[in-house]
Image: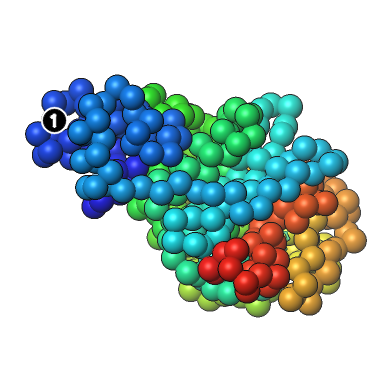
């Protein structure tokens, strides 16, 4: 592996040792790479010869701002980053009373095919490396001048379809010489890849798991989320119940309200039934309209929420931030791709 920025401290130290360097150089280089340096020349406590050797052996790139939009309404900032190979991804910085939250992408595109989502229209191009996920946090902080206290893996891509790299990223942001952001300040959202949920349960991480449910019955869910044909609602809920048993962590269920598709009373009642035995939380999302998709936002949000709450299930309606800047999933990248088949982003 030549991606030094994706390595753990022990691996960086081994790499430096293999170049004949003492162990303390490993810690120095590891720490610099977590500070958002843009070249080895900024690592001023390293001898010049070593900096040159590293630049040869372990070249690295940093993301460039391809577009940046700031919401006039709520200060949400959306970045379209251009990666070293020309691909573009989105990162959103949201400002809440409890601190700044950064929403990062885990893949370039997505192959999960959810019918209402802009991120998946052009499919998946590639996985992001741990360094590219970390850079989204570092460079968003540096460009905005705002400190990030929470991370959500809810941008473009399916994190559990790139789980090895995501786990390594979590290790990197968690490290005291890095951003030192605790697992309880991190959320990971999945469309329901059951083997990944089971693997996470085994690790007993203290992060918050969000499951994009969007329908409690397999008939509806399979129509809007192809992943349900591989892991149906029964299989998914069995994994969620086991996850709660194992980790003691409450799962958050994302539910984008789609007019006439998943907003019926019987579906609220079915959610209540499926959650029995587990303290779930349902996050109702007003659907963001995607040009290429036929779905319309539901007008039954309040009634659906009331029906869940009256039966003892906590349900919130997600406050929509950045509505004026295409700040929802994949929309900015999609727009840039359509507008620019001219070279701003290669994908
Ligand atoms: N792949 C992961 C994480 C990325 S999407 C997942 O599926 O959970 C983050 C959330 O936004 C998911 O719950 C997703 O289903 C939802 N989402 C996607 N498109 C949307 C839209 N048009 N309106 C509302 N929510 C949407």
Residue 244: x %, y % from top left: 50, 43
Residue at position x 25%, y 51% in the image: 2
Where's ligand 1: which quadrant? bottom right
Please determine whether, in this image, residue 147 is positioned above or below residue 345: above
Nearer to us in this view, 10 or 210: 10
Residue 273 appearing in the image: no
Residue appearing at x 58%, y 34% in the figure: 141
**Residue located beneath label 1 in the image:** 21
Question: Where 83 sits versus 230, above or below?
Answer: above
Residue 144 appears in the rendering: yes
Give the colour scheme shown.
rainbow
In depth, the one of 44 and 216 nearer the eye is 44
Tell me: 10 left or right of 324.
left
Residue 346 or residue 270, whichever sits in front: 346
In the rendered image, residue 93, in percent from the top left (x then y), is placed at: 66, 40
Which quadrant of the figure has residue 233?
bottom right
Residue at (51, 36) in percent of width and height: 138
């Amino acid at each position: 592996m030549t991606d030094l920025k994706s390595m753990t401290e022990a691996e960086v130290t081994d790499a430096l040792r293999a170049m004949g360097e003492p162990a303390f150089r490993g810690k120095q280089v590891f720490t610099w790479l977590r500070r958002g340096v843009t070249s080895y020349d900024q690592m001023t406590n390293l001898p010049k010869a070593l900096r040159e050797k590293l630049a040869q052996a372990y070249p690295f790139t940093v993301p460039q701002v391809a577009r940046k939009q700031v919401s006039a309404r709520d200060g949400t900032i959306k970045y379209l980053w251009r990666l070293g190979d020309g691909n573009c991804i989105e990162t959103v910085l949201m400002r809440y009373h409890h601190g700044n939250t950064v929403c990062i992408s885990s893949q370039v595109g997505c192959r999960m095919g959810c019918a209402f989502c802009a991120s998946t229209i052009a499919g998946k191009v590639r996985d992001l490396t741990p360094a590219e996920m970390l850079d989204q946090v570092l460079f968003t902080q540096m460009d905005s001048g705002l400190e990030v206290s929470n991370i959500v893996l809810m941008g473009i891509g399916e994190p559990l379809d790139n789980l090895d790299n995501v786990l390594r990223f979590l290790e990197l942001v968690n490290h005291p010489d890095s951003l030192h952001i605790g697992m309880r300040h991190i959320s990971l959202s999945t469309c329901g890849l059951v083997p990944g949920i089971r693997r996470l349960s085994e690790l007993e991480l203290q992060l918050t798991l969000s499951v994009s449910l969007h329908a409690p019955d397999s008939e509806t869910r399979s129509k809007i989320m192809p992943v349900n044909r591989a892991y149906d609602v029964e299989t998914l809920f069995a994994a969620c119940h086991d996850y709660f048993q194992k980790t003691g962590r409450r799962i958050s269920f994302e539910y984008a309200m789609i007019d006439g598709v998943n907003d019926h009373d019987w579906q609220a009642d079915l959610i209540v039934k499926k959650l029995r035995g587990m303290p779930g939380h349902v996050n109702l999302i007003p659907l963001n309209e995607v040009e290429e998709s036929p779905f319309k936002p539901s007008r039954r949000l309040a009634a659906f929420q009331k029906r869940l709450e009256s039966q003892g299930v906590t349900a919130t309606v997600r406050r929509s931030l950045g509505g004026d800047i295409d700040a929802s999933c994949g929309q900015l990248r999609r727009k840039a791709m359509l507008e620019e088949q001219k070279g701003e982003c290669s994908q």
